[in-house]
């Protein structure tokens, strides 16, 4: 036997680990044929209980996929030896509706135990959030594995602040192979949901340290936001991200054109020359927005770290695994 053979075997083994999973439509058609309809049913239930919850769940795809790929690392609770992503700068007091994912997982575990990954749940549920609120419906690729770990630091380093400007966002999305058009379309996710006063205080009272408000704010809208978020406000008070926060439509882009974007990172897409053309286009053509949004979501859903994974039994914790024949405590 060649002395190189063991090295070759090890190399091939490593290669299969780092190339990641092959994603495909209808991945669960044999193993859990009801998977997609169960997720849709649970999302519908969640929306009836609280309309905003579906927007909150959709946001999870962005915050999961940008941190080491779409691997449900975001859903892991802290442990004594791991700081999870839930408490990172962009996520703390902000990400919500984790219990909707738990309910979906429970329903799936009842139907087909240990089969459907939490990472795939996020992808299906995000698509459903859009479809259920009047937006496009599309086929998702599935077959992701759940991560064995999470990184608060990576989340702190990567997730953008609401203060971000278009140039920064263009560069950030480029790092994930997402184009300017993808970035603008994906920002259209803010067609549904809400944000906190915390995220806009600086633009209302001290934009870029000027002691003044963001000049791009339309005066009537500024007045409305000043009333919602006075300087003394509890900064967890929330406001709508566009004028139709329960309907997925192109109103968000129309609002940007009229200076009524909620976040600085939204309004900057109309101030910046490179992104403005897309904002205009999407504000005039909802079909174009929907097509670009679908494409962006599928591309974002393709992000993978190539690290080894598993199908978690519970989305908040990694599975207990045997160590020297014993189960880890
Ligand atoms: C382009 C860069 C982005 C920035 C800077 C950004 C930032 C934010 C901020 C600051 C909030 C409000 C959080 C709070 O005040 O607690 C928010 C809400 C939201 N974001 Fe983004 N976001 C971006 C892109 C995305 C993408 C790509 C998606 C999904 C595809 C997304 C989906 C959402 C949704 C649905 C909400 C409302 C959530 C709710 O009502 O609970 N965002 N985003």
Image (cartoon, rainbow, N blue to C red):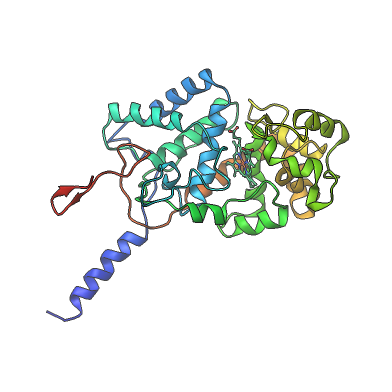
Eyeballing the image, is 252 above or below 14? above
Q: In which quarter of the image is residue 266?
A: top right
Image location (x, y in percent) of residue 301: 48, 46
Mark yes or no: residue 25 visible: no
Taking depth in this image into account, of 85 and 235 the one nearest to the observer is: 235
Can residue 104 be seen here? The reply is yes
In percent of width and height, residue 35 lies at 36, 31
The picture places residue 116, in percent across and down from the top left corner, at 33, 37
Asked if residue 228 lies left or right of residue 178, the reply is right
Please give the name of the residue rendered at 37% of the width and 51% of the height, measured from the top-left corner: 149
Residue at 77% in and 48% down: 276
Spot the residue most to the top.
48
Asked if residue 329 lies left or right of residue 189, the reply is left
Quarter-of-image position of residue 167: bottom right
Q: Residue furthest bottom?
A: 3
Quadrant that contains the N terminus: bottom left
The percent coordinates of residue 97 (x first, y second) are 50, 31
Give the number of callouts.
0
Relative to 24, is 235 above or below? Answer: above
Q: In this view, does 162 lie above or below 16?
A: above
| Residue pictured at 51% horizontal, 40% vertical | 60
Left or right: 291, with 117 as reference point: right
Instruction: Answer with the quadrant where ligand 1 appears in the image.
Output: top right
Quadrant where the C terminus sits is top left
**89 or 301: nearer the eye?**
89
Instruction: Tell me: residue 31, above or below residue 82.
Output: above
């Amino acid at each position: 036997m060649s002395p190189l053979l063991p090295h070759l075997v090890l190399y091939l083994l490593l290669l299969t680990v780092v190339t990641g999973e092959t994603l495909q439509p209808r991945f669960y058609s044999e193993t859990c044929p009801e998977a997609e309809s169960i997720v849709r049913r649970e999302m519908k239930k969640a929306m009836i209980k609280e309309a905003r919850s579906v927007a909150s769940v959709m946001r999870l795809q962005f915050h999961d996929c940008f941190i080491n790929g779409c691997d449900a690392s975001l859903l892991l609770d802290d442990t004594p030896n791991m700081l999870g992503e839930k408490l990172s700068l962009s996520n703390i007091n902000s990400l919500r509706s984790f219990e909707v994912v738990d309910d979906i997982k429970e329903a799936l575990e009842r139907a087909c135990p240990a089969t459907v990954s939490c990472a795939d749940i996020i992808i299906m549920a995000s698509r459903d959030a859009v479809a259920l609120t009047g937006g496009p419906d599309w086929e998702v690729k599935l077959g992701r594995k759940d991560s064995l770990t999470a990184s608060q630091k990576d989340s702190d380093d990567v997730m953008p602040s609401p203060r971000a400007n278009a140039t920064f966002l263009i560069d950030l999305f480029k790092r994930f192979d997402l184009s300017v058009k993808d970035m603008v379309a994906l920002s259209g996710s803010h067609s549904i949901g809400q944000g906190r006063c915390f995220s806009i205080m600086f633009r209302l009272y001290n934009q870029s340290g000027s002691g003044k408000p963001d000049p791009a704010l339309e005066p009537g809208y500024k007045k409305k936001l000043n009333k919602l978020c006075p300087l003394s406000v509890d900064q967890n008070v929330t406001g709508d991200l566009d004028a139709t926060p329960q309907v997925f439509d192109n109103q968000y882009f129309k609002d940007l054109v009229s200076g009524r974007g909620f976040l600085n990172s939204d309004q900057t897409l109309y101030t910046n020359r490179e992104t403005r053309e897309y904002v205009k286009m999407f504000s005039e053509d909802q079909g174009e927005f929907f097509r670009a949004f679908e494409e962006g979501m599928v591309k974002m859903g393709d992000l993978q770290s190539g690290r080894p994974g598993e199908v978690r039994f519970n989305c908040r914790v990694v599975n207990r695994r045997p160590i020297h024949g014993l189960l880890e405590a």
